[in-house]
Image (spheres, rainbow, N blue to C red):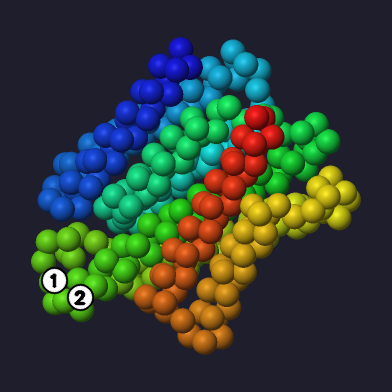
Amino acid sequence: MITFLFGLTAALYALACGLFIVLLSKGHDALGRIATWILAAAAVCHVGFFVARFQVGGLAPFSGIYETLALASLAMVLAFLLARIKYRITVLGAFITPVTLLFFIGAAIGAGAGEVPRSVQSALLWVHIAANIIGIAAFALAFAAAAAYVVQERLLRAKQIGGVFQRLPPLDVLDGLGFRLLLIGFPLLTIGMVIGGFWVVRGAAHSLSAAQMLGIVTWLVFAGVLLLRSVAGWRGRRAAVGTMIGFACASAVLVGYMMDSLGSAG
């Protein structure tokens, strides 16, 4: 059952991804609604997958990198579906669903990783991981808005104001949405960093791993983007590129943790 639900969820994510990409190029409203409903169905199957995995294995939601990656992908989908209610950003599914699918498949790769060591298992760990998961979901949606901004601006510079250009949200909407999402994600990332630093100071970790150091870099990148927006008036393309770099770093942190866990399990 677990394998079936995983495969079904991945297949639905892939189908939704393909439909959103077609929506970006063709622009049929009915196609957008179908893609959204398929994505919602994938999220329901995703939840069912978690329930089945817990019932069979008795694993807690944050027991390892496998669960963390899978939860992060689900959080991205839910964040997009919720944001779509308020904003006309259905077409951004073409940017967010490929990331969701990659994270979900990455969870399968990390299935062989061991559980979180007993020495750090606590309620504080749940807060640490939950803050990071919700934060990366906000960053993923900000990445989608930033990627759409870069595409939209390039089309505008090339004076290609038909087709895809007309289907993407206006530049000011994308820029404002990305900024608001950073304001949501950055405090959560900071909470995760502070709790992680607490474990380092208390001796739960004897030294910083490559993933932890990359986590610091991620925090600095997002902090820099927000600071430059406030102080230097960064807007538009520069802020979008900075957001994309920050999300790439955040994703690399999870990959780093997965590699560390796989190494420990081996």
Whichever of callouts 1 and 2 sits on the residue coming sooner in the sequence is 2
- Quarter holding the C terminus is top right
For residue 166, which quarter of the picture?
A: bottom left
Q: CA distance from mark 1 to mark 2?
A: 6 Å
Instruction: Compare residues 60 and 103 and report the one nearer the observer.
Output: 103
Q: Specify whether 258 is left or right of 38.
A: right
Instruction: Compare residues 247 and 139 and report the one nearer the observer.
Output: 247
Q: Amino acid at mark 2?
A: Leu
Q: Is residue 37 visible?
A: no
Give x and y (percent) for residue 111: 55, 28
Mark 2 falls on what kind of element?
helix
Q: Amino acid at mark 1?
A: Ile
Q: Is residue 18 visible?
A: yes
What number is the disc on residue 119?
none
Mark 1 falls on what kind of element?
loop
- Which residue does the image show at 62% across and 44% down from the upper left? 257
Above or below, 105 against 243 in this view is above
- Which residue does the image show at 27% across and 34% down from the upper left? 15
- Which residue does the image show at 52% across and 87% down from the upper left? 232
Give x and y (percent) for residue 234: 46, 81
Give x and y (percent) for residue 136: 54, 52
- Which residue does the image show at 81% across and 47% down from the upper left? 205
Q: Residues within 10 Å of mark 1 (few under 14, many from 20)?
A: few
Badge 2 is on which residue? 156
Badge 1 is on which residue? 161
Kindly indicate whether the residue at mark 2 contacts the one at mark 1 (C-beta within 8 angstroms): yes
Q: Residues within 10 Å of mark 2 (few under 14, many from 20)?
A: some
Give x and y (percent) for residue 109: 50, 32
Q: Specify whether 236 is left or right of 52.
A: left
Q: Specify whether 6 is left or right of 19.
A: right
